[in-house]
Amino acid sequence: MKLCIWRSGAVLLLVCAAAVCARADLIVISFDNESLRGLPGTTLQVTGTVTNTTADTLFTNSPTVALSGFAPEDVDASPMLSIPVPANGTLTGVLLFQVAIPQGFAPGLYSGTLTVLGGTNEDADNLKLTEANFAVGVLAAVPEPASAVLLLSGIGMSLLRFRRR
């Protein structure tokens, strides 16, 4: 009897675990540019393809972006509000969100997650439609060649003036 209960419990646990693992996203997001990179002081516009895998039109009513190291006000997911994605359809070139890289931001690679809630009408946000991971690379500012020439000219003039004394 104990063995039968244990087996039933193990089978139920296995079925529940399989149901969690088998969850498919209702929409699939593919980023147009896999390597999102920018300099401090610039704004990245992140675009992509949105594919609906269901037989119903779905609305992307509550998109949120969490990006490590960035303040919430640096990331704007509002372009993706209330986009109707047609049943079994695909939208290309969709502006998903924007990332403003603040001046003086440390160079590096920052990981993020786009989570989209929505539903079958413009007011619904009862379904988790998808979750997509991405990374943003912040590049180090490199001085332009003209700045280097100007700097060297200034040093040269200073040395010349010092030599004449």
Image: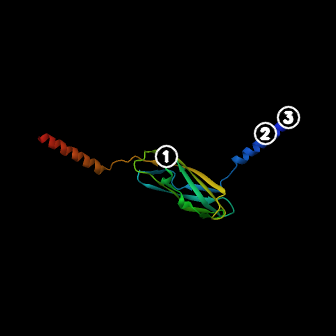
Residue at (66, 56) in percent of width and height: 127
Per the rendering, the mark at residue 2 is 3
Secondary structure found at label 3: helix
Q: Nearer the viewer, residue 125 or 29?
A: 125
Residue 50: quadrant of the picture: bottom right
Per the rendering, the mark at residue 10 is 2
Measure the alpha-carbon separation of dots 3 and 2. 12 Å
Left or right position of 11 against 90: right
Residue at (25, 49) in percent of width and height: 150
Q: Is residue 7 above or below residue 70?
A: above
Where does the N terminus fall, quadrant-wise?
top right
Which residue has dot 1 on it?
69
Name the amino acid, label 1: Gly
Task: Answer whether labels 3 and 2 touch (C-beta < 8 Å).
Answer: no
- For label 1, count other residues whose C-alpha is less than 10 Å away and answer few (under 14), some (14-19) or many (20+): few
Q: Position of residue 72 (x, y in %)?
A: 51, 52
